[in-house]
Amino acid sequence: MLKYIKNHMETISGIEIYPIISLLIFFIFFVALFWWVFTAKKDYIKTVSNIPLDNHQNDDIL
């Protein structure tokens, strides 16, 4: 099955660019995420991490 797919893919012109584009998207996404994590303000991280434990918001739902 894989041999059939490989042979079929080799006949398509310009297909070699798609793995490169996929790798670039993957790399750029994780570099951006890594940059955001290290540049995020500590107050924002603390506020967001305490949202599930905030009882005042849960009282409004009930």
Image (cartoon, rainbow, N blue to C red):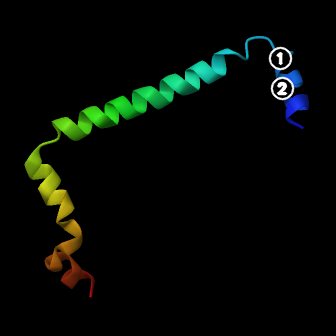
Q: Position of residue 52 (x, y in %)?
A: 24, 70
Q: Picture quarter containing residue 49?
A: bottom left
Q: Position of residue 51 (x, y in %)?
A: 20, 66
Tell me the tag on residue 6: 2
The residue drawn where x is 17% and y is 66% is 50
Instruction: Kindly identify which residue carries mark 1.
Output: 10
Tag 2 and tag 1, C-beta contact below 8 Å: yes
Q: Is residue 50 above or below residue 37?
A: below
The residue drawn where x is 73% and y is 17% is 15
Q: Secondary structure at mark 1?
A: helix
Q: Picture quarter containing residue 39?
A: top left
Q: Position of residue 3 (x, y in %)?
A: 88, 30
The residue drawn where x is 83% and y is 17% is 10
As drawn, is 34 to the left or to the right of 1? left
Q: Is residue 39 above or below residue 43?
A: above
The residue drawn where x is 16% and y is 74% is 54
